[in-house]
Amino acid sequence: MTLLFSLLAFLTGIASVGEPVGVNLLFAGDAMQHQAQLDQAKAVGTGGAYSYDDCFSLIAPAITEADYAVVNLEVPLGGPPNYSGYPCFSAPDSYAQALKDAGFDMMLTANNHCLDRGDRGARRTLTALDSLGIDHIGTYRDRAQRDSLVPFVRNIRGINFGFLNYTYGTNGIEPRDGMEVALIDRDRIASEIKSTREAGAEILVVAVHWGIEYVLLENAMQRSLAEFLVDNGVDMIIGSHPHVIQPMKIVRNDAEDKDVLIVYSLGNFISNMKTVDTRGGALVRARVERDTTGRARFVRANYDTFFSAKPSGPGTNFRVIPSWMPEQIPSDQYHHWQMFDRSAQAIFERHNVNVPRGHNRLL
């Protein structure tokens, strides 16, 4: 009898008697690839290859600990040989491979840089991500592919999650030849929310590329769109684009008797940006559990910060360093990390609502 119960517990994801079935999601912000990052990846690689082997080694355990992890891929994978940084990005496929190896399960592609290499680059990005076997949403080869891939529903440990991704724009570069970018359009969003629910999504996550760059507080447009998404039954709203962190809040949807997570901006995941508030970002862990009535609910969230360190000597690379590993921060950048983290904490402590710091604790 004990053996049978252990088998059933394993199959249903129950860790111990009385513990609810649950899923831990993790979200990270903008994965950038500036020219200095490209140059360094080539310098530490061999035979002309771009190497990112050590960029994510310190943060990877926190990512892989989650049941499902999501990052914003804010560069097209335009293909060799002409990789480039700002203002028109294009990164090698090995960059996406390194993000996958770090533990990310999904890459968001609807952002203002997704068309930096035109339709060809955007479509090649989708081909490259497909070849890596990683989930991705936000851009599509054409309307037919969007209609076939949306709704996107993924079963994670017995709970069905729906994911949607939208951007405010594409830096004025218009898609051509039928390329589809999921833009913020309230009618289209409401329709896709409805179809995702009808496809069986118990928990609905909407990732939005929005806001004003380098501003540490959300604006009226973000608040209005977040309210619209809450009213339409979304369970989690995850923001990107400002390249700095912005507040996180848990709000109540009384009409549906549930809590909703709103993250206005996670900041940069990795970049070569230089101002204090752009030197790092936050990761958010969100817990979903199936209650005793069988209903899946978002129940709580926490966050931690990390620092995007620049190369500290010959043979080193850019590196994402978690806040709980300050001893790993190069001495010449320690002051920059302190300034970034203090600024981020000041915003979170003043404006977060029921989203505490996790101190590297899984929910």
Image (cartoon, rainbow, N blue to C red):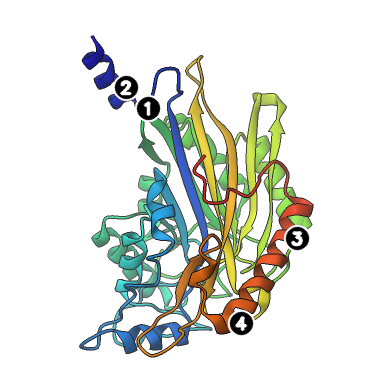
Tags 2 and 1 touching, CB below 8 Å: yes
Kind of residue sitting beneath label 4: Lys
Q: Which residue is mark 3?
A: 346
Q: Nearer the viewer, mark 2 or mark 4?
A: 2
- Which residue corresponds to the image point at 25% horizontal and 13% vertical from the top-left? 2
Q: For label 3, count other residues whose C-alpha is less than 10 Å away and answer few (under 14), some (14-19) or many (20+).
A: few
Q: Earlier in the sequence, mark 2 or mark 4?
A: 2
Kind of residue sitting beneath label 1: Ala
- Tell me the SS state at disc 3: helix
- Which residue corresponds to the image point at 28% horizontal and 64% vertical from the top-left? 127
Tags 4 and 1 touching, CB below 8 Å: no
Vertical order, 18 against 196 (above or below): above
> What is the distance, in whole Å, between disc 2 and disc 3 at their CAs?
42 Å
Kind of residue sitting beneath label 2: Ala
Q: Which residue is mark 4?
A: 274
Q: Which residue is mark 2?
A: 9
> What is the distance, in whole Å, between disc 4 and disc 1 at their CAs?
44 Å
Where residue 354 sits: x, y (%)? Answer: 70, 41
Q: For label 1, count other residues whose C-alpha is less than 10 Å away and answer few (under 14), some (14-19) or many (20+).
A: few
Instruction: Tell me if I can see residue 114 in this picture.
Output: no
Tags 3 and 4 touching, CB below 8 Å: no
> What is the distance, in whole Å, between disc 2 and disc 4 at their CAs?
49 Å
In what quadrant of the picture does the N terminus appear? Answer: top left
> What is the distance, in whole Å, between disc 3 and disc 1 at their CAs?
37 Å
- Tell me the SS state at disc 2: helix
Q: Earlier in the sequence, mark 3 or mark 4?
A: 4
Which numbered circle lies on residue 50? none
Instruction: Tell me if I can see residue 230 in this picture.
Output: yes
- Tell me the SS state at disc 1: loop
Kind of residue sitting beneath label 3: Ala
Q: Which residue is mark 1?
A: 15
